[in-house]
Image (cartoon, rainbow, N blue to C red):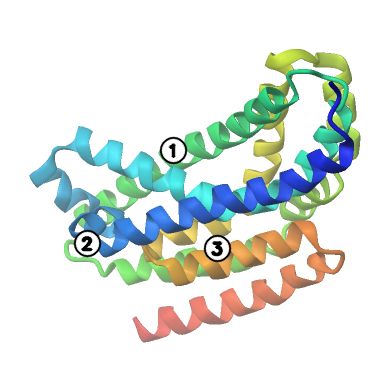
Amino acid sequence: MQVPAIAHRSLLLPLLAGLSALAWALLWLWSSSPYGVFLDHSRMRELCLSAGPFGVANLFVAGWMLMTAAMMLPTTFIVLEMFRRLTLQRDDQPLLITLLILGYLAVWLAFGVLAHAADWLLLDLLDRLQPGVDERVVGAGLLLLAGAFQFSTLKDRCLKQCRSPLGFVTHYWRTQGGRGGAFLLGVRHGAYCVGCCWALMLLMFAVGAGNLGWMLALGVVMAVEKNLVWGRRLSPVVGVALLLSGGWAAIAG
């Protein structure tokens, strides 16, 4: 029996909110436990000596995915709502929506692994060139990078796709279709989302995935940018704030 559209819509937002809230709760419990140290990215190399690189890598992936679910799932509401409408007549609609979400998270997982590896190599290089380098310098650099990126063309183009995804969602679903198409649609949306938010997410490498205050602030910024009518006006404001913060951190460090 076909479930009325209003019932689907009434469940979608609570579903996203519930998944995000669960991720927040798990991160809070983790950060409050003796294992919270494994959320501190700045200590990853030190921890590898005690827990082994494989164990630390698994913990990093778990922490990164929880952080992504907590921060980024609320930003996907517009795409998921459009996809819900396109698949109203499908009996496997819940599975299709799940596959789209998994495709989206897969892109963020790939980005997290690459960013983690690049950050590790950068810190190792800095240690070799200048032993004992203050990692706050790297944090200041990330703040400046994220602030500058808020004014970039790539940020603007990807943000437009995230805010108004009807064109690519409709075209991609009609040309691909099926369960594989739902997953690939999630991958495509994830790519736009990474293109829009990668610099902001890199800040979590400076402050640590266990810093719930920064997570909440950045998550709100990204959700507002993508979902609210006036969201695009927030981008330059955040950019200026990050540039000022990065400049202050560089001078103070």
Q: Mark 1: few, some, or many residues within 10 Å (few <14, many ≥20)?
A: few
Of 176 and 22, the residue lying toward us: 22
- Which residue appears at 70% of the width and 24% of the height? 96
Look at the image and tell me whether residue 198 can be seen: no
Q: Position of residue 52 (x, y in %)?
A: 14, 38
- Which residue was labeled with disc 2? 130
Describe the element under mark 1 as helix, strand or loop.
helix
Q: Inspect the image, locate mark 3, and give the three-letter code of the amino acid beneath it.
A: Leu
- Which residue was labeled with disc 1? 114
Judge from the rendering whether residue 17 lies leftward or rightward of residue 50; answer left or right. right
Does 75 appear above or below 59? Answer: below
Describe the element under mark 3 as helix, strand or loop.
helix
Q: Inspect the image, locate mark 2, and give the three-letter code of the amino acid beneath it.
A: Gln
Where, quadrant-wise, is the C terminus in this rendering? bottom left
Q: Position of residue 38 (x, y in %)?
A: 25, 53
Q: Which numbered tag is attached to residue 145?
A: 3
Judge from the rendering whether residue 245 lies leftward or rightward of residue 250; answer left or right. right
Q: Which numbered tag is attached to residue 101?
A: none
Q: CA distance from mark 2 to mark 3?
A: 22 Å
Q: Position of residue 233 (x, y in %)?
A: 81, 71
